[in-house]
Amino acid sequence: TQRKLGFNFFVALISGGVNVVADFYLISSMGSIGAALATVLVVIVSSILSTAYLIYTFKKNQKGEVK
C-alpha cells in the first residue's frame, strides 16, 4: 500500500477526521486520558483500513489480476 497515494490520502483524511471528533469529545470529558484514548483509536482505525486494503490487494493479485 506504500505506492497507493490515493488510498494513503484517504486513510489520512479518515484518521484526521476521527482524531478531531474523538479529541473533541474525549478531551472534554476525560482530559489528557481522553487525548491518549483518541490517539489509540486513530491508530486502530488507520491500521484496520490499511490491513483491509492490503488483504484486498493480495486477494486481487492471487486471482491473476495485475495492478
Image: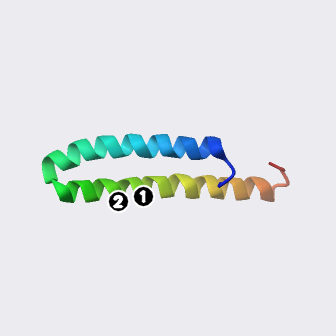
The amino acid on which the numbered mark 1 sits, given as a three-letter code, is: Ile
Residue at position x 65%, y 55% from top? 2
The amino acid on which the numbered mark 2 sits, given as a three-letter code, is: Val
* SS of the residue under disc 1: helix
Against 10, residue 39 (above or below) is below
Residue 18 placed where, x, y %? Answer: 37, 44
Q: Quadrant of the N terminus?
A: bottom right
**The disc label shown at residue 40, or none:** 2
- The Cα atoms of the two marked residues, 1 and 2, are separated by 6 Å
Q: Are marks 1 and 2 in contact (CB under 8 Å)?
A: yes
Residue at position x 66%, y 53% from top? 56
**The disc label shown at residue 64, or none:** none
Crowding at dot 1, Cα within 10 Å, few <14 / some 14-19 / many 20+, comes out as few
Task: Tally the numbered discs.
Answer: 2
Against 10, residue 34 (above or below) is below
Which residue was labeled with disc 1?
A: 44
Crowding at dot 2, Cα within 10 Å, few <14 / some 14-19 / many 20+, comes out as few
